[in-house]
Image: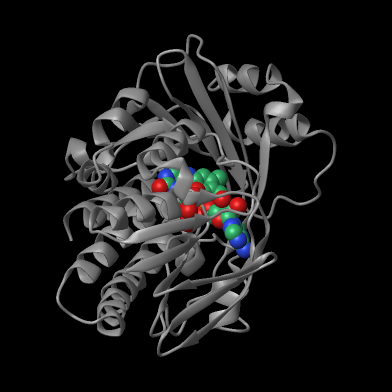
């Protein structure tokens, strides 16, 4: 089967590696001039690592990440963890995003990735799908839209499905040299004025800090000023002097600032020969720290359906039914984690989500 994947981000690259494994002739189209990953570190849960094992890169990914034990705090430094959940419900692997995408691109074979290549449209008929590029057409049997939250494949498949801004909701992050941070693993503080943030080790020598706020108001000053101002909502009575120091010492250019975007709930994720996957299908809040992990889950389900005996449209339909049903629950969990009013409630809701994701 000739398969074109639009988007060489985490999910598109994982899909390419997985589908190569079942014999697809895969081409990845990436609009950027290189395989890179916006973002600092990404937390991968056990379900994502299982899938990366299936495509043969699990151990490599584990060796470059750092296992995180998640702890939640209020702004005075009081720790909270929900009762009745196991260690596994609080553990994930934090991996530097660029290194992760490099491993995946190497696993696919760089010759199968066309850089500087953005799609400008596609036409689908019963013989196949024709992908339109600036320099000509590409014929395929299957087109996978893994082109992220601003997906054009989604827009062409489902007009009026553009991602929308969660107004005032921003995230700031950076990776910095590790210092003498607290030993818990990861520290996430649920602070005042709907601010959350903290830090986690990405590897032996690096730490990632993050701060986000809903209803962030005016964005004044440098990115560092903006992050620092919000970080004070997490830091009372000396708790988090370490985080304040970390942010103050971060070079401005190393700080990422994201407006948080959401993909609306879609009526369908597929047609006869086109499937949406990853953030293109379900870009959601970062508060559950699992969008990439769930995108990798999409890949596993799609690969299994395409490897089965059903024809292409039926395989895509089964993929869609399974994943849309799962995402009905994910959306509920995501909203509940977002709305948690304090550290205790956040810890409870976060554990309920991660436990469900890992076991259901
Ligand atoms: C602040 C923040 C923190 C997060 N933390 C976590 C976390 O800890 N764990 C987790 O699992 N998830 C996390 N997420 C979510 C995670 O980042 C996303 O779910 C994941 O990156 C989605 O991957 P993707 O491949 O679907 O999309 P993307 O990573 O966005 O990749 C899309 C790719 O498609 C390319 N592209 C776009 N349009 C075209 C086109 N027309 N033609 C060709 N190429 C195109 C882009 O250049 C890009 O390379 C977080 C998100 C945010 C914002």
Residue 2 vertical placement versus 204 (above, below):
below
The answer to whether any part of residue 238 appears in the image is no
Q: Which of the two residues, 213 or 27, is positioned nearer the viewer here? A: 27
Seen from this angle, which residue lies furthest top? Answer: 180
Measuring 64% from the left and 16% from the top, which residue is drawn there? 245
Q: Total number of numbered labels? A: 0
Residue 298 position in % (x across, y down): 33, 62
Q: Which of the two residues, 161 or 334, is positioned nearer the viewer here? A: 161
Q: Which of the two residues, 15 or 262, is positioned nearer the viewer here? A: 15
Q: Quadrant of the C terminus?
A: bottom left
Residue 34 vertical placement versus 198 (above, below):
below
Measuring 68% from the left and 31% from the top, which residue is drawn there? 255
Seen from this angle, which residue lies furthest bottom? Answer: 126
Displayed quadrant of residue 123? bottom right
Residue 46 position in % (x across, y down): 24, 43
Q: Quadrant of the N terminus?
A: bottom left
Residue 102 position in % (x across, y down): 46, 35
Residue 202 vertical placement versus 178 (above, below):
below
Question: Coloured how?
Answer: one colour
Task: Left or right? Give the position of 77 relative to 154.
Answer: left
Residue 206 vertical placement versus 52 (above, below):
above
Measuring 27% from the left and 43% from the top, which residue is drawn there? 52
Displayed quadrant of residue 56? top left
Residue 212 position in % (x across, y down): 60, 43
Task: Left or right? Give the position of 262 relative to 272.
Answer: right
The answer to whether any part of residue 182 appears in the image is yes
């Amino acid at each position: 089967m000739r398969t074109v994947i639009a988007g060489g981000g985490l999910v598109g690259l994982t899909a390419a590696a997985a589908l190569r494994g079942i014999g697809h002739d895969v081409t990845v189209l990436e609009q950027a001039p290189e395989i890179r990953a916006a973002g600092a570190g990404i937390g991968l849960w056990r379900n994502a690592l299982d899938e990366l094992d299936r495509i043969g890169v699990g151990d490599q990914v584990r060796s470059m990440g750092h296992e995180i034990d998640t702890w939640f705090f209020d702004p005075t430094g009081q720790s909270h963890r929900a009762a009745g959940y196991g260690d596994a419900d609080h553990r994930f692997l934090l991996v530097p995003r660029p290194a992760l995408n490099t491993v995946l691109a190497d696993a696919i074979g760089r010759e199968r990735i066309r850089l500087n290549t953005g799609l400008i449209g596609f036409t689908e008929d019963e013989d196949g799908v024709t992908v339109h590029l600036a320099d000509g057409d590409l014929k395929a049997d299957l087109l996978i839209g893994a082109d992220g939250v601003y997906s054009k494949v989604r827009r062409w498949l489902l007009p009026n499905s553009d991602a929308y801004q969660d107004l005032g909701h921003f995230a700031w992050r950076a990776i910095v040299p590790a210092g003498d941070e607290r030993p818990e693993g990861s520290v996430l503080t649920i602070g005042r004025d709907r601010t959350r943030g903290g830090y986690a080790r990405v590897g032996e020598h690096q730490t990632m800090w993050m701060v986000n706020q809903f209803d962030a108001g005016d964005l004044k000053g440098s990115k560092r000023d903006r992050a620092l101002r919000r970080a004070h909502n997490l830091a009372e009575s000396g708790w988090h002097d370490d985080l304040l120091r970390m942010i103050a010492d971060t070079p401005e250019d190393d700080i990422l600032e994201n407006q948080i975007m959401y993909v609306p709930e879609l009526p369908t994720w597929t047609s006869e020969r086109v499937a949406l996957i990853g953030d293109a299908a379900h870009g959601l809040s970062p508060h559950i720290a699992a969008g990439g992990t769930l995108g990798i889950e999409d890949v596993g389900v799609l690969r299994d359906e395409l490897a089965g005996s059903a024809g292409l449209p039926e395989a895509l339909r089964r993929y869609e039914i399974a994943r849309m049903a799962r995402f009905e629950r994910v959306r509920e969990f995501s909203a509940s984690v977002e709305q948690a009013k304090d550290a205790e409630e956040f810890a409870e809701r976060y554990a309920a989500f991660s436990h469900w994701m890992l076991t259901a």
